[in-house]
Image (tube, rainbow, N blue to C red):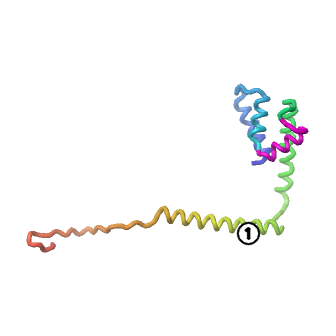
Amino acid sequence: MRHSEAWERFKGYTSQCPHHGFNNESLLSTLYRGCLARYREMLDTASNGNFLNQNVDDGWQLVENMAISSDCYVQNCDSKDWSSTAHSIALEAQMRKDMLALNSKLDKLILAHFQAKHINYVSGKSLVKDQEGEEN
């Protein structure tokens, strides 16, 4: 999930439950600790060392600015046509190879789970021996 998506989701959750009882410092700390390591590093770097040591309002503003900034970069990358690059061709080939391997594993798993079991056939015809041992 992109940073901007996570930020929007976080804001949505806190606005849906405005009487949650957490102060802004606690919410900011929770957001920071829930981020991926690369985003925490970016927040720390942008905060001159330690994100959680700065003013809470400055922290919220920094998170908002980073979300807007990262969203702009992603939109620029998403709109570019990468279909003719050698990288995308190699990536597609690797994805196909991985997909075939996963399909093979899935087939083996299904076969192992649903192995044909020995079945005794029962016919509708009843064989009854009479007293003299003859079958009817």
Q: What element carries label 1?
A: helix
Q: Please give the range of residues in magenta.
A: 36-51
The residue depicted at 31 percent of the width and 68 percent of the height is 121
Q: In this view, does 85 lie above or below 22?
A: below
Magenta stretch contains residue 130: no
Query: Depth check: 43 or 100 in front?
Result: 43
Q: Position of residue 71 (x, y in %)?
A: 83, 47
Q: Name the residue under label 1.
A: 93
Number of numbered discs on residues: 1
**In the figure, is residue 101 to the left or right of 41?**
left
The residue depicted at 77 percent of the width and 68 percent of the height is 90
**In the figure, is residue 48 to the left or right of 82?**
right
Q: Which of the 4 image quadrants contains residue 8? A: top right
**Residue most extreme to the right:** 48
Q: Is residue 65 above or below residue 136?
A: above
**In the figure, is residue 93 to the left or right of 58?**
left
Q: Position of residue 83 (x, y in %)?
A: 81, 66
Query: Depth check: 64 or 23 in front?
Result: 23
Query: Depth check: 119 or 51 in front?
Result: 51
Q: Position of residue 88 (x, y in %)?
A: 79, 65
Magenta stretch contains residue 38: yes
**Residue most extreme to the left:** 132
**Residue most extreme to the bottom:** 134
The residue depicted at 52 percent of the width and 63 percent of the height is 110
Query: Depth check: 3 or 109 in front?
Result: 109
Majority SS type along the magenta span: helix
- Crowdedness of circle 1 by 10 Å Cα count: few (<14), some, many (20+)? few
The residue depicted at 78 percent of the width and 69 percent of the height is 89
The disc labelled 1 sits on which kind of residue?
Ala
